[in-house]
Amino acid sequence: MKKKLALILFGLAATIALFGCSSNSSSGSGASGGEPVEGGDLNVAMTADPDTLDWMYSGESAARKIGWHIYEGLFALDKDYQARPLLADGYTVSEDKKTYTITLRDGLKFHNGQDVTAEDAKASIERWLKVSSVGKITTTHVDSIEATDDLTLVITLNDPYTALLTDLAAPKASAVIIPADIVEAAGEQPLTNEQLIGTGPFKFDSWKRGNEIVLSKFEEYQSREEEDWGGLTGKKTAYLDTIHFKIVKDPQVMLNGLKTDLYDYVQSIPLDLYDVVDTTPNVEPAISSNGYSVITPDKSEAPFDDIKVREALHAALDKEAIAKATYGNSEFYNLDGALFTPDQTALYSDQNIDDFEAYDQDEAKKLLEDSSYDGQPVKIIFSNDHAEYKKIAEIAEQQLEAAGFHVELESYEWATYLEKWSDGANWDMVVVGWSPFFSPNQAGMVSQDSNSSGWYNSERWQELVAQWGEAEDEAAQKEILAELNKTIYDELPFEKVSNLSTLDAHTSKLQDYEDWYGPRFWNTWKSQ
Amino acid sequence: MLNYTIRRLLSVIPVMLVVSIIVFLLVHLTPGNPAFIILGEDASPEAIAQLEEQLGLNEPLYIQFFDWLKQVITGDLGTSVYSAQPVTELIFANFGPTFSLMVLSLLFILIISIPIAILIVSLRKTILDPLFTNVSLLGVSVPEFWLAILLVLAFGVTFPVFPVAGYMPLADGFGAWLYHLLLPAFVLALVEIGIIARMLRDSMLDSVNQDYTKTARAKGVRERDVLMKHVFANALIPTTTVLGATVAGLLGGTVIIETLFTIPGIGQLLIDSIHRRDYPVIQGVVLFIAAIYVLVNLVVDLLYAFLDPRIRYD
């Protein structure tokens, strides 16, 4: 009996020793393993399945990350976030900049075998204008859409809105092209599983809700030829036979699955597990830009309806300290005050952002004393489903208390938070993160007179956004973007904390994989 | 017996009614509703109001309740707000993995705890008895999630004998089904093994020195037969009571185990539905679980009569 007990104890000790003995090796994302291999199944772990796979209807990130394998639009963003043709062959713009004549590429097929025609594009864009959050912004500028022949689409605008192509290329609630008969059948409701027909390199196969979504290679896919565009356009080759998007809620399960080849790619790993990912053999981190976190005050009522109080708030927040304590590794955040992130080269302006870091505790106290703030408690609400929002709120609370504010924190799970957020009576400030957006009129934290912007109402902002939509060229747009930056620091509608990145990880068997704004599994393949 | 069974089955109705009222109120009084979740953070107040109307959420609560109750009485648990699938269909699709997990766990519990208890009682005067008492206490005290993580690290990652997550339905082959369920079923069973083995051991020890066992020994019956035919048989009644509660407890335990092993069962369905505020699914699943509890208790009561011929219900 003693011998048996000793054996058990030895076994336990050996197991514990082995757990602590993982070897250390690391390599960057995008390793190349030579000649691409056709075939194979890719297993991707993601935390939740979307409400719908109708990427035109939904702005959800889960719908986007799967949707862009299935669907394509006339235009799409390249790796530098610039709009480029995708299903479109080319386009011309009339002199008054109000008529866009777009030619479709010849020989394109939908997943159900139908030819792609201008009538499909017309029906799809008309639906997009009604159901998409981006389309609803564009629709005010659109006068008519006509299919003049099988491959030609003419979009006539009410005004010279130069942001049309950017809107058509937006990867959020996207203007994707689906068959006209499906548009008619679906109307303004989300597409059903049977209606998930696109033109992308992978087609929809099956969906077991809460469990798995399966896509398979579309053999008749007609690719563009441009190899250097990247992003969502240019040359796309589907090497893999199938992609299985599996729903896995626990990040530790994801990592264990990655180590044991159960999964090939795992999404949304908590940032504090970066070192584990980085030191695990045959596992590579994939880091991509993920918008930024903000603290938004409710500007419709006291105390933050007073710009002086907002100035005190601005001076009271030490953003570097908040970002450092929240995100830890500097790989995942950067302090930058612009409306867009630096990787959005066409949209980013570094002008007028010097006031971003204005931390000065004494100045904050002085501003607060001179303001209308009467010492009433200010309530910060946040969703406790996101650990980083909690950290931001807690550190901000300390800094604001030090400046003379009286602060209360209230946290809710996501569903309750959304309801509380909708009513300004429930909060004075919210902490939330915004995923990337691709034109100033898509920026939720400054959307006029809405809860998401804390009821921001600014004629100056609206005027600048209108000017941006009509700007002659990129240089003119950059000037307006610089003015938008200035407006943020003059009017202080929100407090940007820092740009952030998201952490995914994949097996080193995944070859030629390129990090971008979310995972894309064309042009990548699995080595044996 | 038949009368008793019918009476018990009829008593399920008021229980289910009370459960349905409680779950309906809990679900609807919790802040957050499906309209906010479906439309997300960009939603305008108008769009939310429109969707609430579409979903019937703007009606007074009692009208919503009676509308739902009318449906339930006709056997229709409604339709998921999220997936538009009938709730009954969702429950049955997700109950397969949960049922598999429960059956396999119960099997583990029975085939491990009963022999252990008998062995301990037969060796009750050795060091094994106090050792068992302490080890089983440890088994009962260990949190399931912690044990699951350790076992996955040991037998899923370090020695990759079992998959770290996932589920294969029985239709895809018995081997694959068993392979995916062994580890989660064992984790789910472990705490209960400790409880049942201790319960059985204690009950058997109570009987081991009773007059009827002494008489049996005096008549020359072998100790093995005394233990199995007299002591074990009599200890089964209290153990069955605990086993009934265990089956119900397993259903609760699957919620954690299904999350840790990514098994698409009823627990996962419930948690996802709570996060999405999918009212019809939450209500349907809770009613279904309550019905199982009630039925398990009924089966346990009926088993008493089978195990002890002296018990008669009529």
Image (spheres, coloured by chain):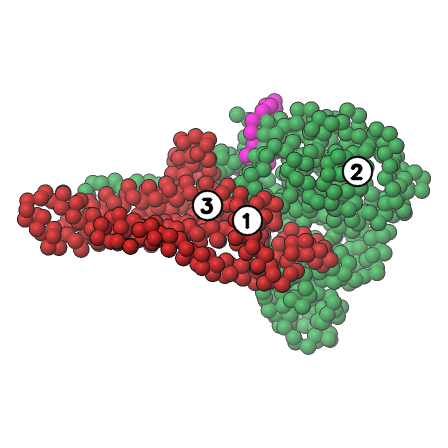
Chain colours: A green, B red
Q: Which residue position is annotated with label 3?
A: B258
Mark 3 on the same chain as mark 2: no
Q: Secondary structure at mark 3?
A: helix
Residue B27 appears at what percent x and percent y? Answer: 55, 59
Q: Residue furthest bottom?
A: A374
Q: Which residue position is annotated with label 1?
A: B76
> Of the residues shown, which amino acid type is indicated by label 1?
Asp
> Of the residues shown, which amino acid type is indicated by label 2?
Ala
> Of the residues shown, which amino acid type is indicated by label 3?
Glu
Q: Tag 2: Cα neighbours inside 10 Å, few (<14), some, or many (≥20)?
A: many
Residue A52 appears at what percent x and percent y? Answer: 64, 43
Mark 2 on the same chain as mark 1: no
Asked if residue A37 lies in the magenta stretch, the reply is yes
Q: Tag 1: Cα neighbours inside 10 Å, few (<14), some, or many (≥20)?
A: some
Q: Chain of mark 3?
A: B
Q: Is residue A20 visible?
A: no
Mark 1 on the same chain as mark 3: yes
Q: Secondary structure at mark 1?
A: loop
Task: Judge whether B36 appears above or below B222 on screen.
Answer: below
The part of the chain drawn in magenta is A26-44
Q: Which residue position is annotated with label 2?
A: A123
